[in-house]
Amino acid sequence: MDIADTAQRILAGERRALARAITLVESGREDHRKDAAALLEELKGSGREALRIGLSGTPGVGKSTFIEAFGCFLTAQGLKVAVLAVDPSSVRSGGSILGDKTRMERLSRDPNAFIRPSPSQSQLGGVARRSREAVALCEAAGFDVVLIETVGVGQSETMVAEMSDLFILLLAPAGGDELQGVKRGIMEIADIILVNKADGELKSAATRTCADYAGALRLLRKRPQDPEGFPKAMTVSALEEEGLQKAWDEMTALTDWRRETGHFKARRAAQARFWFEEEVRQSLLSRLSREPIKGALETLAQQVEAGQATPSAAAVELMQTYLGG
């Protein structure tokens, strides 16, 4: 790949070049990683900045329906929207369905929208390891809003908060004991909670669920990056496209306040540091799959299986022999 040419094509907004670049950054091959690093370095001075919105929610909450309705709402206002949808990968085969374009048929035909499904592979938090780099590519391509959809709700889902400016939690009404259904860790990182499906017979249930969460949010410790009234809970209907304007107004109001007070820039700086440290950790882990450490790891593992060594002693031996620690 011609790095300089690809960078210019991405800056010009060419979708084919953007898609090829995302494929490149998602690759685990060593030569591809070097090319990806060079491409990102080439693009880092573009000065373009998108609003990064992380979206999470339990399966069946209507994430795809909401993203399509919300994406079409944004493009109707003249904004360019990129959707990075992460699908869960099979533990057995490693494959993913990657059906988000099929579920978002209307948005996928919109000339101002770009949808890219990616496999989560073995990554925790429901985001692919390279989603952050894909976000940077979309920013360089001139998109105004990047929506990062994750596979579901879990304690490790906090990873998506480390690559987004706003974290939106999507919930369904009448799901049983709602306040027990979502872990506190997710509640603490959510900027806005949207109770979806507030239409038809579920409208009153959605209103009650929203009130429950609004009360729960008031009990959480105040965060320095929030103005008065945030985080907050709201009702929306992706099916009837109601509440989208109000939700967007709240998102922009929160973003504007954070920009004015310096929290926006400080948060992005902290995220950059987080991903540097994460990259170092992942690079160290990848050494375990290469010789000679790979062979030594297998030998010691066999000794542990046979009861000839304890897991702790074997780990110490490996670290001292090959990693100097």
Image (cartoon, rainbow, N blue to C red):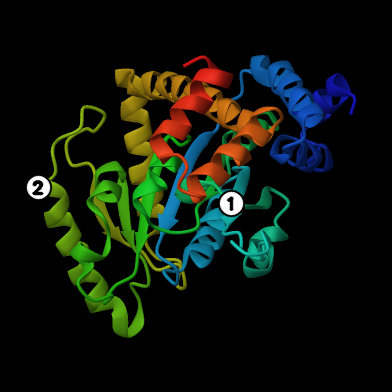
> Split into 4 quadrants, where in the image is the N terminus?
top right
Residue at the spot 29% in from the left edge and 73% down from the top edge: 173
> Element at badge 2?
helix
Mark 1–mark 2 Cα distance, whole angstroms, equals: 33 Å
141 lies above or below 116: above
Residue drawn at x 45%, y 47% as measured from the top left: 307
Left-right relation of 93 to 165: right
Question: Residue 254, how many percent across, how many down?
Answer: 32, 36
Neighbor class of circle 1 (other Cα within 10 Å; few <14, some 14-19, many 20+) is many
234 is higher (above) or lower (below) than 190: below
Name the residue nearer the viewer: 293 or 285: 293
Residue 146, percent from left and from top: 56, 42
Can you tell which mark lies on residue 120? 1
Seen in the picture, residue 77 relative to 198 is either above or below; the reply is above
Q: Which mark is residue 190?
A: none
Can residue 243 be spotted in the picture?
Answer: yes
Image position of 34 with respect to 294: above or below: above
Check the image and name the residue furthest to the front: 308
Q: In which quarter of the view is residue 204 placed?
A: bottom left
Q: Residue at point 59% right, 51% down? A: 120
In which quarter of the view is residue 261 placed?
top left
Give the camera-side residue of 121 and 318.
318
Residue indicated by mark 2: 219
Expressed as whole percent of the image width and height from the top left, the position of residue 53 reads 47, 43
Could you tell me the amino acid type at mark 2?
A: Leu
- For label 2, the crowd category at 10 Å Cα-Cα, with few meaning under 14, some 14 to 19 and many 20 or more, is few
196 relative to 217 in the view: left or right: right
Query: Is residue 130 at all visible to an observer of this figure?
Result: no
Q: Which residue is farthest bottom?
A: 201
In the rendered structure, which disc, 1 or 2, sits on the residue that comes first in sequence? 1
